[in-house]
Image (cartoon, rainbow, N blue to C red):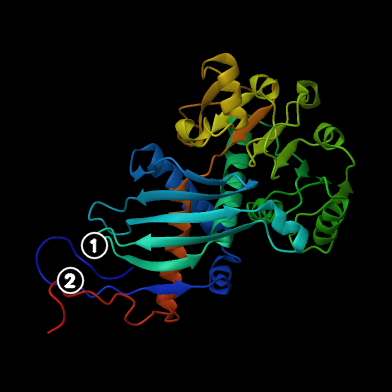
Amino acid sequence: MPVSQSGPGPVARPTFAVIPGAQVNGVLRGREKQVIDLVEAAYRLHGAGGTVNPDSYFLRFPDRPDARIIALPASLGGDADGRGAVDGIKWISSFPGNVASGLPRASAVLILNDPATGYPYACLESSVISAARTAASAALAAGALSRARGDASRPRRVGFIGAGLIGRFIHTYLDAAGWEFDEIGVHDLKAEHAQQFQGYLERGRGGGVGRVVVHDTAEGLIRSSDLVVLATVAGSPYLHDPSWFSHAPLVLNVSLRDLAPEVVLSAVNVVDDVDHCLKADTSVHLAEQLTGNRDFLSGTLCDVLTGAVRPEAGRRPLVFSPFGLGVLDLAVGRFVYDAIARSGELAVTDGFFDELDRYGKS
C-alpha cells in the first residue's frame, strides 16, 4: 500500500497501479487456505464493528431487465495504528446473456483507496477476486456450520445446481479446505454445461472427486445430496417443495434467489449480514415479506464462528445465505496488491494524477 499520512506535513506523491487478471490468478491460485483465513478474519472484524459496509447499489436497465451492475463500497479497518486499513469499491456486472456467446456472465473491477488521503492507488481485475471470496465464504460456512450443528462427519455427497465459474471455484475451495466426497452431483438447465462441469471434475482438476453424476432434475440432485450448492443466475424462486429437503441437508444458498419462502421457513437460516441479505427480493427477503418478521433467522456466520449461535442438530435443513460483503473483496484485493508489490512486479502508471499542485505547477 502507498506510503501516506494524515495531518499536516509532506505526503508521498500518490501513485496508481493496474493489476490484470493474470496477476490476480497468479497470487490466488494455490493459496485457497490463506484466502479462507482472510475471509474469516474479515467476517469477524465486520461482526465486531470494525468495518463500514453500506448497502450495495444496483444499476438496472429497462431495456435489459436480466442485466445489472452493482456497486459495493466498503471500508476495512486495520490495526490500532491504522496499518492494513483499506477503503474501496467493487463494480461488478452480471449479464447472463454473455454465456450464450461464450463470455463469462460476470466482469468486475476493484478500486482500492488510501484511507489517509482518499486517493485511489490500484485498480484490480476483480471477477476472480469476487469468485474467490465467494468460494472462500462458502467453504468457511460449510465447515463452521457442519461443526456447529454437531454433524458426526462432514457431508460426503455434494450437489451443485449451476455449473458455472462460481460452482467451479466453490468446489476448488471445498477441496482446499479438506472436503472429500464419495459422490458429486451436477444439475444445470443447460445439459451441455452440466456435462462440461462433469468433465472438468472427472479430469481431476479440482481434486476431492468421487463419482460424478449428472442429474436431470433439481429434485433428484437435492434428495441425493447432503451438501447442496446453489450457484445459478436465477432471478426468482424455482425450488418450492420443502419435502425435497426433508433429509436436512446443509444448503449454501450462494445465488440467493433459488429457494421459495416455504423452503426458507422450513429451515434453520444463517446469513452473512442481516440487513444486507434481507433486501432485493432474495429468498430470505421474500420470507420476511411473507411473515412480516425476521424470527426465522438464527443469526449470522460471525455469530456461529464466535459461538454466539449454535444451529440445532440436523432435524431441519440448514441454509446459509450470503449476500456478499464488499469488505471481503477489500480483504482479498489488499492481499493481492501487497503480494504483487512485494514481488516488484507492480505496474504503476506514471503521472496518473496530474493536478497535484493546489495552485498549478510553477
Residue 212 appears left or right of 65: right
Q: Is residue 317 visible?
A: yes
Which label was assigned to residue 170? none
In the image, 78: left or right of 343? left
- 2, 17: nearer the viewer: 17
Q: Position of residue 48 (x, y in %)?
A: 36, 38
- Which residue sits at x=55%, y=45%? 60
Q: Is residue 233 above or below residue 18?
A: above
Residue 3 in picture, x, y percent from top left: 26, 70
Circles 1 and 2 in contact, beta carbons < 8 Å: yes
Residue 117 has which mark? 1
Name the element at disc 2: loop
User: Foreground residue, 19 or 146?
Assistant: 19
Asked whether residue 41 is in view, the answer is: no
Furthest toward the front, the residue is 63
Q: Give the residue pinned by disc 2.
A: 11
State the image coordinates of residue 258 (x, y, percent, origin top left). 70, 35
Q: Residues within 10 Å of mark 2 (few under 14, many from 20)?
A: few
At label 2, the amino acid type is Val
SS for tag 1?
loop
Q: Is residue 115 left or right of residue 168?
A: left
User: Considering only vertical position in the picture, is 150 above or below 168?
Assistant: above
Position of residue 83 relative to residue 347, above or below, is above
**What residue type is disc 1 on?**
Thr
